[in-house]
Amino acid sequence: MATRWGICGAGKISHDFSVAMKTLPSGDHQIAVIASRSLERAKEFAKKHGIPKAYGSYEELANNPDIDIVYLGVLHTEHWRVGLLFLKAGKNVLCEKPFAMNSRQVKDLVAAAKKNNVFLMEAIWSRCFPVHAEVRRLLAEEAVGDVKLVKAYFGSPQLHIPRSVEKELGGGALLDIGVYCLQFVLMVFNGERPESIQATGVLLDSGVDESVVVAMKFSRNRMALCAFSISARLLNDAVISGTKGSIKVLGPMHCPTTLVVNNKEMEYPLPEPCLPLNFTNSTGLRFEAEEVRQCLLKGLKESPRMPLADSVLLTEIMDEIRKQVGVAFSQDSQ
């Protein structure tokens, strides 16, 4: 039977997610409902994507018994509140990154999922890409010897986008794109907590981070270096350097199609979209949707590719980086 999806939020990422779903067999995945705070927007979205039902509130979606999983594509600042609404209603949830505004909110979501015995996953789509699966396989085989240094850079000029620069909307480079660099490091080091974190950055007048550099030290003298910016275009690649060679994920490292292992290049092409996309390589969201389906079929409550412990640690690291750089959100004092 097809996995029946409810989409929450009619914005750009929900559009791309819906387009990506069209590249999967309709016998496996069906979008049954779209919910927006505006019924008009929901109806418009439903018409564009051929979705049978449209709701003008999130509560209606939470009360629909015929949905297997909710995809949460609302603003960062809304993830905690809306996520809890669905989890308490006994719904499985795939929540866009960043999971929430801080680690306290993330722990609330994880606790609610466990209490209601439902599936929950942070939508770090990168982890579901074939390139990342191959990276994990190579690391397990020790293809580059002992890993010594991991480097991940992501820079994309987006100072013109209100969501990226306004504090009330959860802006800043860290939560929007830095999260991809940090999750990559955690994937390489198997969800291990760093021994030390040193971060420095520059802030915008709005009080959010424009550019940040983070150095992390892990056990056994292993290091990680991340740089991310919403004002500069960086290489957007990730490199794992070991005692016997290197693995390079070519840009865009957060949704990659090219891997270079000891100078040998491998390609993993994506399917073409049926409608124009808002973001790079968005048909790759199909891998995340399929990962969720497989987890649900197996009765799992979290994904082994993006376990909840990784999400908690990721947010704790981001909390520490924000503290060092000097970024505080209103949610931190609630």
Image: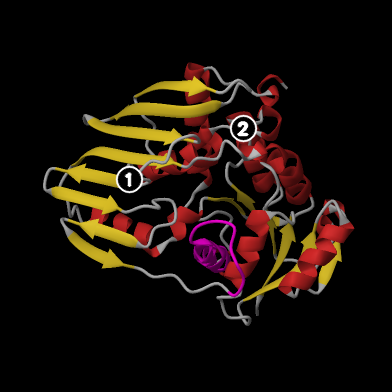
Is disc 1 placed on a helix, strand or loop? helix
Q: Nearer the viewer, residue 114 or 261?
A: 261
Q: Which residues are magenta?
A: 274-294
Disc number placed over residue 272 in the picture, else none? none
* Residue type at the position of mark 2: Val
Quadrant of the rendered image containing residue 195: top left
**Vertical placement of residue 300 versus 156, above or below:** below
In the rendered image, the quadrant that contains the C terminus is top right
Q: Residue 1's x, y, as percent? A: 65, 80
**Vertical placement of residue 197 versus 125, above or below:** above
At horizontal 55% and vertical 36% (from top left) the residue drawn is 175
Tell me how the rendering is colored: secondary structure
Q: Count all numbered tags in the image, as a single digit.
A: 2
**Vertical placement of residue 270 versus 120, above or below:** below
Disc number placed over residue 188 in the picture, else none? 1
Q: CA distance from mark 1 to mark 2?
A: 30 Å
In this rendering, position of residue 191 left or right of residue 203 = left
Quadrant of the rendered image containing residue 169: top right
In this rendering, position of residue 243 left or right of residue 39 = left
Q: Are marks 1 and 2 in contact (CB under 8 Å)?
A: no
Membership of 94 in magenta stretch:
no
Q: Residue 146's x, y, as percent? A: 17, 43
The residue under label 2 is 165
Residue 166 visible in the displayed image: yes
At horizontal 44% and vertical 70% (from top left) the residue drawn is 270
Q: Residue 101's x, y, as percent? A: 63, 33
Q: Which residue extends farthest front?
A: 160
